[in-house]
Image (spheres, coloured by chain):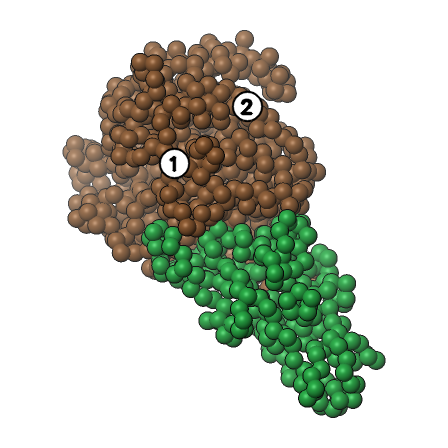
Chain colours: A green, B brown
Amino acid sequence: MTDENKAPEAPAPESTKGSGLSRREFVTGVGGLGAGAVLGGLLVKGLLLPDEVIAFPASQGYLLVDTKKCAGCTTCMLACSLVHHGETSLSLARIQVVNDVFVPCPGGVAQEQCRQCPFPACVEACPTGANHVDTANGNVRTVDASKCIGCERCVNACPFTPARAIWNGADKHAQKCDLCADTPFWNEKGGVGGKQACVEMCPLRAITFTKAKDVPLQGDAGYDVNLRQGDKNWKTWGLAGA
Amino acid sequence: MAGGYKGKILRINLTTKEVSTLDTAKYEEYGGGHGMGSAIFWDLVPDKTIKAYDPGNVITIMASPLSGTLVPGCSGRTEVQGIGSQGYPVEWFTRSNFGGRFSGTMKFAGWDGIVIEGKAEKPVWVDIRNDNVKIQDATGVWGLDTQEAQEEIWRRVQSDTIGNWSSIGSARDSGRTTQRPAVLTMGPVGESLSRTAALIHDSGNGAGQGGFGGVFGSKNLKAISVMGSGSVPIADPKALMDARLWSYQYGVAGHPDDLSSAGAVSMFVNPPGNQAGSGKPVGMSGIPMGCMACHRNCRLRWPDGAGGSNGSGCVDYLWYNSHEKAANGGVQTPAMLAATDLMQRAGINAYMLEAGILWLVALNKLGICGPGKQIDTDLPFDQLGQLSFAKALIDKWVNKKDIGAQLHEGLARAAVAWGRYDEDTASGILPLQAWGYPQHYDARTEVEWGYGTLLGDRDINEHDFNWMRWTMAAVNGGTPPCSPQVLSEIMAEKLTPYNDPMMIDHSDEGIYSESMAKLVAWHRHYTRYYKQSLGFCDWAWGDYVNPYGPELRGMTGEGEPKFFNAVTGKSQTFAEGMEIGRKIWNLDRAILILQGRNRDMEVYTEYNYTQPAVPGYTTYEVPYGAVVFENGEFKYKSVAGRILDRAKVEEWKTKFFALEGWDTKTGWPTRDTLSKLGLDHVADELEKNKKLGG
């Protein structure tokens, strides 16, 4: 097994460690440059605020799931790959559902959606700005495949298992959940202002999209929520956890 | 090739260890699944009379172009075919299928199906990782039950990793997945070559009938494992997304605030986790569990420790749960789940257990079966309904001990061994309907079920018209959503190409009519193509009467082609699909004929002609309401108590053969019929064997 199968470590806070400069010194030295600029091989990411703190604007939308509702049918995964790539595949899906079939409920199912992290380690890790905050699309964290050099630093940087930034071995670039901002293969409008294929397709409504004013509570409880309570069918059907 | 196909079928010869491929394009006209399996079997097995356990038997495990895509209640099915060891008195070429994620995973690995022939020297399992295929030594897997075997294979293939990116192959771009391998395995009864051995996948998915677990065992094949990281090409992705969203309007998924459909007449509409209402332990509820891309997710994940019963449904429980409930003062307990777990782990065909227990209990009551009796057994009949009885029976069955030695061979052959076949199938205490298959639904009331079983290879297990009894007929306490007259109009629209409203007439006259012949023919053609070849699941399709549909019309006729064409890019009509189904049905008929079939053999067991249709032949059947046309109008009426008229059944067979273009003397297709279907080569083979209809 390769290193990628170990849980990735949290990214080092000092991304300019090797340069001998502190982050503050580095930023002060280059002045106010926007996200993704490359300067002499070094890179500045994020926005430069007046007090020289790098911050990433929060995403304006988040996927929330309910693993006590999910049937493990992987419809979300197939829909995700279809609307992004025009073909159905579990390996290309930017949401991963894992079903441990012999495990009793309420366990056994995991829905691993991208959390659009307030501090996106994947964006921070990207040396080219391919993985970036898309300010034109509700600040979704997404990969511009044309800039991806295939280093997989984003894949390794994601603090979650499985990594939400994924490697597309067929087209040879990283990719991740963009809240369906770039989904040419369906007739709906995606993105923060539109619909998400996984949400629309989930037959049990075990995924929802929120345009929360506040960022979800950072931790599992913020992203794996109770969607059964609001579903009046769930109780009628005599299903667990109604 | 058209969208949906991967272009190649994996062919493995276990004798020579040769791994090769078949070109899917050669078989594309058949759609996928069953049609391809029959055509491949035709090509690869020159002598169709060989036995099921002959190494020359070919077993096909086929996906369809729709597998691993987003077709609701379809993309999860896998079709299995070959000469099955269950059929009595002839081991008919037969089929089974199962749900889950196996067919989709085959497609992601790059395969439209798998063909297995020959016999390995020693026990093996097949290890497929994308296009890398190995025949592995099954030491340490052989001997395990169906759950343990899968767990062991998961360990061997990827250290039991689940939920993290795992490489398939060693190159950076050879593909990654978070999913476990999809494994198809048989249990201990398959290893001992039982005719009652099933094939099991994940938890609760089973190809139960046909004896395919025994066929695996005869090949020294324990299991097949597939990992796949690729994609299924879709011709028109937008059309597929639109089609799926359109279909949600016909199901509960599209009506979150409207429960008027609960318990409705349409299989497509049925809610998640309801497993055909087969009962739940009191106070216990579960979470839905379903097959790949299903919109219904009809099965349940349970909260207690009996993990093996996760995802089971219907007869997986029905074989025992009524006994369990009766033994507990009318209260269902978790022992029901534990009994199912035992059955699934052993990998036994649940229908055999279901009818077997009814029979053994009847024999015990008659003083024929018990300690020191004519059929000597220490099976604890006084513990019927308790877990101990189920365990004792399954132990005997798996280990061929006590009465297990005969039951292992299936109920028909056990009855022959005990000298009880004629008597017990005449009284009906051994409810084998035809060909050694336990009665599933009653040939005397639901005649299209019985006829399809009789003229085919097995219990049809296709519920397209069964729902009319359960939910339509007021005699069952159900509330029909429409009058029987309207029902006949809707069905007449749907049942292309015959479009005859009288097809649903189940009156005492109607059941022997030419219209009934049309219903049976329609049913066989539709199911051969849409369900068995393309994978539309019996638990969701056909969709005939749907409470959400315009004027109650369901999707069938429009829905199936919509999905097929979106995936493949073709412009196939429903009528064209039905014609492909007719072609496959004729090809199958030819195989059965080469195995020895003729109309004289096509006779039900005696009880169907002499005993009235009343409850007790299964653990779940109730007296049936039916749709009848009497005195100039359609009505709902109970037809409980009916028996079949032997002579009229024979006359009806003649009508059926005439309709199908088969020689009415023999039931054999004519050259003209086969030629018009593009099956000249089949006609040639029948003629060579002097079995061509004249």
Which numbered marker is on residue B582?
2
Q: Chain of mark 2?
A: B
Q: Give the image location of residue B38, x and y in percent.
A: 56, 30
Could one spot residue A90 in this view of the protein? no
**In the rendered image, which quarter is residue A84 located in?**
bottom right
Q: Give the image location of residue B226, x and y in percent.
A: 57, 51
Q: Residue furthest right?
A: A40
**In the rendered image, which quarter is residue B362 located in?**
top left
Q: Chain of mark 1?
A: B
Amino acid type of the residue tagged 2 in the rendering:
Arg
Q: Quadrant of the C terminus of chain B?
A: top right
- Within 10 Å of disc 1 (Cα), the crowding (few <14, some 14-19, many 20+) is many
Mark 2 → mark 1, Cα distance in angstroms: 27 Å
Instruction: Kindly identify the residue that appears in the image at 48 percent across and 51 percent down.
Output: A203
Q: Is residue A69 left or right of residue B439?
A: right
Q: What is the secondary structure assignment of the residue under circle 2? A: helix
Amino acid type of the residue tagged 1 in the rendering:
Val
Could one spot residue A213 in this view of the protein? yes
Camera-side residue of B453 and A35: A35
Do circles 2 and 1 both sit on a common chain?
Answer: yes
Q: What is the secondary structure assignment of the residue under circle 1? A: loop
Q: Give the image location of residue B686, x and y in percent.
A: 57, 17
The first of marks 2 and 1 along the sequence is: 1
The residue tagged 1 is B265
